Amino acid sequence: MIKGTLILAAAALTARFLGLFQRVPLDYMLDKDGQLAFAVANQVYLLLLVVATGGIPSAISKMVSQRYALGRPEEARRIYKAALLFGAVAGVLLTTAMFILAPVYTDIVKKPIAELAVRAIAPALLLFPIIAMMRGYFQGRQFMAAGGVSQIIEQILRVIGGIGLALIVLAWGWGDAWGAAAATFGSVFGSIGAFAVMVWYGRKLRRQDLAEQAKKGSSYLRSRSGSGSALPFRSIYKEIFSMSLPAVVTAMTVQFLYTFDSTLFIRLTERFYDLETATHVFADYTIKAMSLAGIPPILAIALGASIIPVISSAFSVGNMNEVQRQSSLVMRIVCFTGVPIALLLTVAAYSVTGFLFSSPSGSGTVALLTLGTIFQITMMTTNSILYGLGKPKKPMYHTFFGLALKVVFSIALAPFLGVYGLIIASSICFIVITMLNVASIWRIVKLSVLGRRWGTYMIAVAVSALAGWGAENGILAWTEGWPDKLSYLVAGIVTAAVVGALYLALLAALRVITPEDVRSFPGPLRKLLTKVLKPFYRKAL
């Protein structure tokens, strides 16, 4: 599980940073209307992609891992074929719908300038549903490298293609509407590259399977011949959709919140902002805050993809001790590693925003949104655990309730707090879903995350955050006469060092992290923590 998580986390982190570096130049290249056109197109595209594929790869992963655990590989390959057919049909339908309905959606958003961008990104939906099906199959086989490498290639081509085209279009003087459309068209290049990588890995995995079958001999082949090969597509789709509908709902949570905010931002905040101010705040929210807020949950996304087949396999054979151990471990890793990343981006929001983008405007929005990702991380992780435990409907119902709260609190708070009201409403949604998920998990398996160490853990988090906030403000004051970018860079580096070092030291000094926790981590991280924590634990490590 940890090995698969590391592969997916490293790939997702690389892909996320590459995606961020597409947003950064756009902040310099396009005006606020152009940035909004890009953001609107990107948000509706991502929502449609999640709706079409968000739950199915997870369902495929679970179904494939179960078939291989029960010794029925032919059924797993049959499931894979059915999934690819669905992905192809979904891609054609989504692309057509998005292209035709682009004017209708941009009219709802009150941003007709985004119509070209919405239509430019539509062709990317042709291949991405198929790619998602392939990633689900590979994850079920616990072959994580394929999805990881395809993500990286996708983002490289997306950034290079999108930014390159945008530069050309703007140099020709076609304006920001065409510039935003060119930037979104980079996703089409990314889809082609990711599909090529997945096809290559598919052939590689096929050769490995044939070699393994050959080693086991003809008797094995005869015993497996036709096993599950006659499994009808109708039965497969029934199983996939019964499992994937709940997963679609949970997978679309974050994207729904962002699309809801993007679609109704101007309408919900018109009492708080005038139109010009709303446009600037909206651009900062979508281009800066949303892109930076995507970094902390990377580990949770990777953990979720890795933990589902592991827990599912253990649960399917009744090994509840392994289910309890893996579920507790994944929650512990999230606490120790996911929270400090969100914490750092929160306290250093001014410096990070000012260094990466054209100005630090919107840093308050960045800080509040990244702080809320702490609860987003716990929500996503507990969703995955329940899905692996064969209870996909539980997080679905919890998500419906959380989304309803999001809508209610957004309508209530946005007219009086503006963008902060929308972010607070999203955080309430994450917190409620997490609490309901944890209660459901405890009815099946007793988690052992931190036990009595929660109090000292919160002290470590609070002290680290306060120290980081003080360090950033001190460095910014000390470097006031320096060039802005250099001042932001130094402040960000010092803040990261203070938060990271103090957080780790307090975890050890307050005995929040134990030698058993350290020994459960991956080799490289275990070696590093052993050296750092040895003075606190002496012979225990």
Image (tube, rainbow, N blue to C red):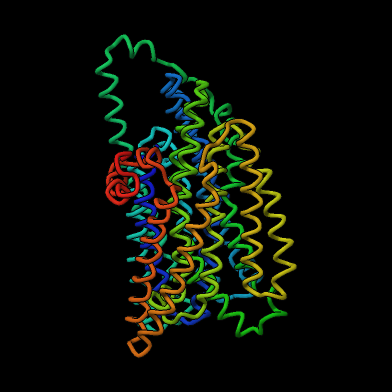
* Observer able to see residue 27: no
Q: Residue at x 66, y 82 (%)?
A: 273
Q: Nearer the viewer, residue 362 or 462?
A: 462
Q: Would residue 206 appear left or right of 124 to someone viewing this image?
A: left
* Observer able to see residue 330: yes
Q: Position of residue 479 (x, y in %)?
A: 35, 85
* Quarter placement of the C terminus: top left
Q: Position of residue 446 (x, y in %)?
A: 57, 33
Q: Quadrant of residue 527?
A: top left
Q: Residue at x 65, y 48 (%)?
A: 399
Indicate whether 10 appears above or below 167: above
Indicate whether 385 appears above or below 190: above
Q: Nearer the viewer, residue 292 or 166?
A: 292
Q: Position of residue 378 (x, y in %)?
A: 54, 49
Q: Residue at x 53, y 79 (%)?
A: 33
Q: Residue at x 47, y 61 (%)?
A: 342
* Quarter placement of the N terminus: top left
Indicate whether 430 appears above or below 450: below
Q: Position of residue 10 (x, y in %)?
A: 34, 51
Count of labels in the image? 0
Q: Quadrant of residue 408?
A: bottom right
Q: Would residue 539 appear left or right of 294 to someone viewing this image?
A: left
Residue at the farthest top position: 219
